[in-house]
Image: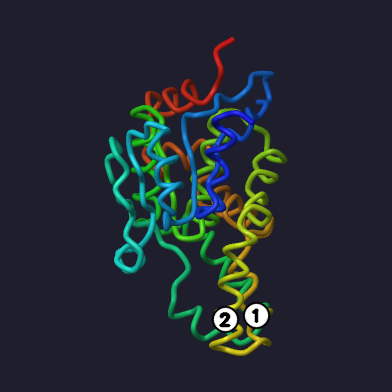
Amino acid sequence: MSTDEEYLRLASADNFRDVAGSGYATTDGARLRTGVFYRSNDLRLTDDDHGRLGAIGLRAVIDLRSPTEVDLHPDPAVPGAEPLHFDAIGIPMERMSGLERREDAVALMDDVYRTFVTEDRSRTAFGGVLRQLATGGPQLFHCSAGKDRTGWVSALLLHIAGVDDPTIESDYLLTNARSAASRARVEAEIATHLGPDAVAVYEPTLVVATEYLDAAWTAVDRHFGGRTSYLRDGLGLDDDVLGELRGMLRVSS
């Protein structure tokens, strides 16, 4: 097992992985470079995993969570890594608390992904994250579960690098397998506090689904006329930033 593979299996951050996978292929026959950008769920790390994370040599740890989420579980300091915060809109807790039907949970998640595209605060956050990442790796970005806000940033990076949509979708859905252990703990808490029947109601908010990602891409097309305009006009990314990201993520031929 390689060093990178070991880092992608932090026991206490089960959705921690390399944005590039094992080196995804691009549509023009190139491959992605590993060890540049990492993604994760929240960093409630064991001492051993904290040491492994510190050994990567991160330049920055980018936190996409709300101030309330940050206060609840602050990130540990990582030697050499600058802590940065970009507050993107996640799942609104006031809507979560009122869920009674599974279909309402699915509709909530569709709305969350649309706000990634339509809400100024989210666009400001995602644009800021991508500009920060363009300053050079290795860097880590994360939210709470590492699936929605983090998943969207990762999908954008893979698109910028030239990865096709089926691969982007497959990587996005990998969250469901990688975060099974942490999801089971949340489901147990739901069953304890709200009853066993509530687990099925809330389950759509605990996973990723193709429908959610499609809701965001559809909003991109509807509101910006396509991904290029979303990146440039919606997120404010210029040719230099997009070129830096693309160059860092792709292995030179």
Quick check: 93 above or below 139?
A: below
**On the image, which quarter does residue 162 sit in?**
top right
Separation of residues labelled 2 and 1 (CA atoms): 6 Å
Q: Name the residue under label 2.
A: 190
Q: Do the residues labelled 2 and 1 touch (CB within 8 Å)?
A: yes
Q: Which circle's residue, 2 or 1, is located before the other in the chain?
A: 2
Describe the element under mark 1 as helix, strand or loop: helix
Is 4 or 148 nearer to us in this picture?
Answer: 4
Quick check: 36 above or below 73?
A: above
Q: Where is residue 58 in the image (x, y as percent from the top left)?
A: 37, 34
Q: Where is residue 208 in the image (x, y as percent from the top left)?
A: 63, 59
- Amino acid type of the residue tagged 1 in the rendering: Val
Please indicate whether residue 219 sits to the left or right of residue 203 in the image: left
Q: Where is residue 167 in the image (x, y as percent from the top left)?
A: 69, 38
- Amino acid type of the residue tagged 2 in the rendering: Ile
Is 102 or 239 nearer to us in this picture?
Answer: 102
Identify the disc placed on residue 240. Answer: none
Please indicate whether residue 81 sits to the left or right of residue 250 in the image: left
Badge 2: few (under 14), some or many (20 or more) residues near its Cα, within 10 Å? some
Q: Position of residue 71 (x, y in %)?
A: 29, 66
Please indicate whether residue 37 sits to the left or right of residue 120 in the image: right
Q: In which quadrant is the C terminus drawn?
A: top right
Q: Name the residue under label 1.
A: 199
| Badge count | 2
